[in-house]
Image: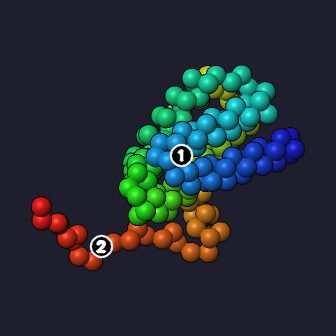
Amino acid sequence: MVDRKKRAQELIKYHSYASGAFGLIPVPGADVAAVSVAQLNLIHKLAKLYEIEFAQERTRAIIGALMGGVMPGALSSSVLGSAVKAVPFIGTALGVAVMPALSLAATQALGRVFAQHFETGGTLLDFDVEAMREHFRKEFEAARNEAKDEAGEAPAAAPQMEEPPVQKAG
């Protein structure tokens, strides 16, 4: 059903951009929580679209297993990106540079993986995390590359200090 595929793509796009925007939340931890809610909401809406029974706890477990098994570096970057926002001024800037892109790409990859699984008749009960990890990793990399292409440039690197910070005597 072409209309269903198109609607799934619209849901994925909407929730991905929302996740990217939530990555801008300056409060450490609040950004991660908001992105998690958006991802869960996306899977819920995709399940509804494909007439699949939704189970929130099962979905959380699948998302955690997919992301934790495929993106430990990206996950630690997103947690670090969130935590670094606690540092006044520079921390907020660094967190804002990391979180939106990772959040958008992860949500887009999740949406694509779940939509394909549902499209082929799969459910949350028969979702095989081990079998889908590589597919998720490829979708995540593709989403990150698409985000870079849309921005017209590579993401900015974190600023590096040329000299070590001066310690105050005291």
The residue depicted at 70 percent of the width and 31 percent of the height is 44
Q: Which mark is residue 153?
A: none
Three-letter code, disc 2: Met
Residue 2 found in image quarter: top right
Query: Label 1: how many residues lie within 10 Å, few (<14), some (14-19) or many (20+)?
Result: many
Residues packed near mark 2 inside 10 Å, few (<14), some (14 to 19) or many (20 plus): few
Outermost residue, front side: 170
Residue drawn at point x = 17 percent, y = 66 percent: 167
Q: Would residue 63 appear left or right of 69 to someone viewing this image? A: right
Find disc 2 in the rendering and name its residue.
161
Query: Which residue is located at x 79 percent, y 27 percent?
Result: 51
Q: Position of residue 15 (x, y in %)?
A: 69, 46
Tag 1 secondary structure: helix
- Position of 158 relative to 45 (above/below): below
Place of residue 9 in the rendered image (x, y in percent of width and height, measured from the top left)? 76, 48
**Callout 1, which amino acid?**
Asp
Compared with 134, 96 (above or below) is: below
Element under disc 2 = loop
Residue 67 picture location, percent across and down: 49, 41
CB-based contact (under 8 Å), mark 2 and mark 1: no
Residue 132, given in percent of the width and then of the height, sits at 54, 39
Taking the image as drawn, is residue 74 in sight? no
Task: Classify the position of the C terminus by image quarter.
Answer: bottom left
Residue 150 in sight: yes
Q: In the drawing, what numbered circle is on residue 31? A: 1
